Amino acid sequence: MAIEIRPAVEGDLPGIARVVVDAWRATFAGLLPEDFLKGMSYSHQEQRHRRYLGHAGIIYYVAEDEKGEVVGFASGGSSRDSGFSHEAEVYALYLLPAYQRRKIGSALFAKVAGDLGDMGHKGLLALALENNPNRVFYERLRGQPVSTEPLTLGGTAVGQIAYVWDDIPALMESLRGSAG
């Protein structure tokens, strides 16, 4: 199954929205309130990502299958949280469940992290919900976990963890070394 990683374009927004909603519903079923997950909509996610796609300094990549369907995406830019010394952030990294654990997430992460490094950023962070079973992905990439403030999603307090990398060039070297 051939997957292409490429910069996202406006026509990818419906696919990006589908990936967000479907990935959240699959990953967090039984972990977050059912009403919250059912309330997620493709149209809202499409509008949300439309606001950011194409903005200077915000990076989007999609993973596209051989049929041209978006099966995953990643985005990043300047850190949204001034409480960290890491000035760049991977904002989102989502894959449809059928495409997880195939190194597609690693390829998306590497594209976003590499571009952020090329923009002059030195340190990087990525946030994950504490109860996300897929957060081990960041641990495998040697992200250092740091506790952060909890979020409230659907009326439920949920912890989140920031994974940080102090040196994007060293991270990229590590990613290149693990790819071979």
Image (tube, rainbow, N blue to C red):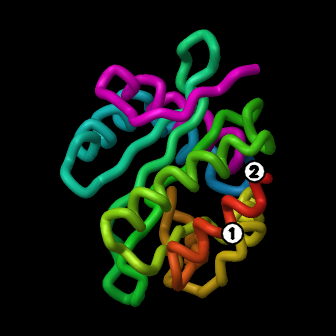
Q: Which residues are magenta?
A: 1-28
Q: What residue is drawn where x is 26% and y is 46%?
A: 52
- Vertical arrangement, residue 76 with respect to residue 26, above or below: below
Residue 14 on the magenta segment = yes
Please name the residue shown 65% across and 76% down the image.
143
The secondary structure that dominates the magenta segment is helix
Q: Residue furthest top?
A: 67
Is the Cβ of the residue at disc 1 closer than 8 Å to that at disc 2?
Answer: no
Q: Which residue is mark 2?
A: 30
Tally of numbered discs: 2
The secondary element bearing badge 1 is classed as helix
Q: CA distance from mark 1 to mark 2?
A: 35 Å
State which quadrant residue 122 falls in.
Answer: bottom left
Residue visible at 62% across and 52% down in the picture:
33
Which amino acid lies under the numbered mark 2 shown in the image of this protein?
A: Gly
Query: Which numbered disc covers residue 174?
Result: 1
Q: Amino acid at mark 1?
A: Ser
Quadrant housing residue 31: bottom right
Residue 139 picture location, percent across and down: 74, 71
Please name whichever residue, 88 or 155, is drawn nearer the observer in this view of the structure.
88
